[in-house]
Image: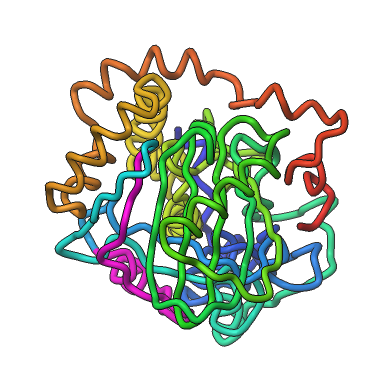
């Protein structure tokens, strides 16, 4: 494993470190390196940060670790320079439309905006990176890299997609999630409202070709359940991919974020995984330690459990999800979700079978690129959503 540890002699410490990609993982890595006195260059082929997003709300989960995620980031050297609204409760629905109140004794997740606008996760990290001396180069493709580098170019395939609307509303702040395969095959639909802005989407793990139908059903569902009125709705979409890498190294360089496959396979709450991987890559370069050993110690247990949970979720179906919601609703949701994401005897037993099933990407056969207008077919690699 020693061959995977970056050189940390005086010469290598003076070499600029190139980070390819200005997403959350890449910017987090850049900030930590710059705070340690390293010269950092970030090369991003888009003209700004957050080009895959449009100001939609997403959740920075707070249950996979024992500590609060913002405290974890602050301790590593990442300031909370972006808007992060704590969410401690919400409403979940099963396939029958029955509602379950979900409440935790600590923040379940932080609501953040994605994109390049003021206050977004990406814009906050960008401003922070610039303030500590990171050289950000937009509109610059990295065709070749010399010297130390980290690659963070984002997802290369679509194992899950999310599509829906961003809108303005007079509705009160609220958080809703629905587990119904008619709305989101093997996934969930969600409605998030904060400060007069909202995001409604279907997050689907299959059935991509019927994306428009699933989105329309999700809209009607939340209109019926909450009385939602969307003003100036604007469509949006995104995609993600999941895998357990062998090394998360390529050409001797660490891979971080979704490029490495660091995602939550159960629900797609992968921002915390991405940020952690960027911090770990920076740590390996600063200390001259083994990046593979670091990510395997801190991320691999979560990735394995995620695969097992995904296998169990698919097998349980709508009725299994209903039973799980009943259990979570009757308990402290924070503690229950934390236990769900930790390795257990069941997930360890299931893992070999689950990994065999998910050895290959979760390719959706309906997404055949023939008359398919899903997010991935319309805006896949080489396109901007």
- Figure check: 81 above or below 207: below
Q: Is residue 78 left or right of residue 369?
A: left
Quadrant occupied by the C terminus: bottom right
Task: Report the residue at 30% width, 27% height from top.
Answer: 320
Q: Residue at x 80, y 65 (%)?
A: 46
Span shown in magenta: 68-94
Which quadrant of the figure has residue 321? top left
151 sits left or right of 112 in the view:
right
Asked if residue 245 can be seen in this view, the reply is yes
Q: x, y percentage for residue 68? A: 26, 65
Q: Position of residue 81 (x, y in %)?
A: 46, 82
User: Is residue 259 visible from the viewing direction of this image?
Assistant: no
Q: Position of residue 279 (x, y in %)?
A: 45, 60
Frontmost residue, 354 versus 223: 223
253 vs 380, nearest the viewer: 380
What residue is at 66 percent from the left and 60 percent from the top?
Answer: 19
Along the viewing direction, whichever of 253 and 214 lies nearer the viewer: 214
């Amino acid at each position: 494993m020693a061959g995977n540890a970056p050189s940390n002699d005086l010469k290598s410490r003076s070499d600029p470190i190139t980070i390819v990609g200005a997403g959350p993982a890449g910017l987090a890595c850049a900030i930590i390196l710059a705070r340690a006195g390293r010269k950092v260059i970030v090369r991003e082929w888009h003209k700004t940060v957050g080009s895959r997003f449009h100001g939609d709300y997403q959740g920075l989960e707070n249950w996979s670790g024992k500590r609060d995620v913002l405290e974890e980031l602050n301790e590593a050297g990442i300031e909370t320079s972006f808007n992060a609204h704590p969410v401690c409760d919400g409403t979940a629905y099963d396939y029958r439309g029955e509602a379950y109140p979900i409440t935790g004794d600590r923040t379940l997740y932080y609501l953040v905006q994605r994109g390049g606008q003021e206050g977004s996760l990406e814009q906050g990290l960008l401003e922070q990176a610039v303030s500590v001396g990171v050289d950000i180069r937009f509109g610059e493709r990295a065709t070749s890299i010399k010297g130390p580098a980290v690659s963070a170019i984002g997802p290369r395939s679509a194992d899950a997609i999310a599509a829906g609307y961003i809108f303005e509303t007079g509705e009160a702040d609220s958080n809703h999630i629905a587990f119904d395969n008619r709305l989101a095959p093997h996934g969930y639909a969600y409605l998030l409202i904060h400060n007069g802005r909202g995001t409604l989407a279907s997050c689907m793990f299959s059935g991509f070709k019927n994306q428009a139908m699933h989105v329309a059903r999700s809209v009607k569902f939340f209109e019926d359940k909450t009385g939602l009125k969307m003003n100036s709705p604007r469509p949006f979409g995104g995609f993600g991919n999941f895998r357990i890498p062998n090394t998360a190294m390529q050409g001797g360089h660490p891979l971080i974020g979704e490029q490495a496959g660091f995602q939550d396979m159960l629900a797609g709450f992968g921002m915390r995984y991405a940020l952690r991987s960027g911090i770990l890559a920076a740590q390996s370069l600063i200390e001259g330690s083994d990046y593979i050993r670091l990510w395997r110690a801190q991320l691999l247990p979560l990735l394995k459990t995620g695969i097992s949970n995904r296998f169990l979720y698919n097998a349980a179906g709508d009725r299994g999800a209903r039973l799980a919601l009943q259990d979570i609703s009757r308990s402290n949701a924070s503690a229950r979700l934390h236990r769900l994401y930790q390795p257990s005897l069941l997930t360890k037993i299931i893992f070999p079978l689950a990994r065999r099933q998910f050895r290959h990407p979760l390719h959706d056969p309906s997404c055949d690129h023939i008359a398919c207008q899903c997010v991935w077919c319309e805006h896949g690699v080489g396109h901007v959503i």
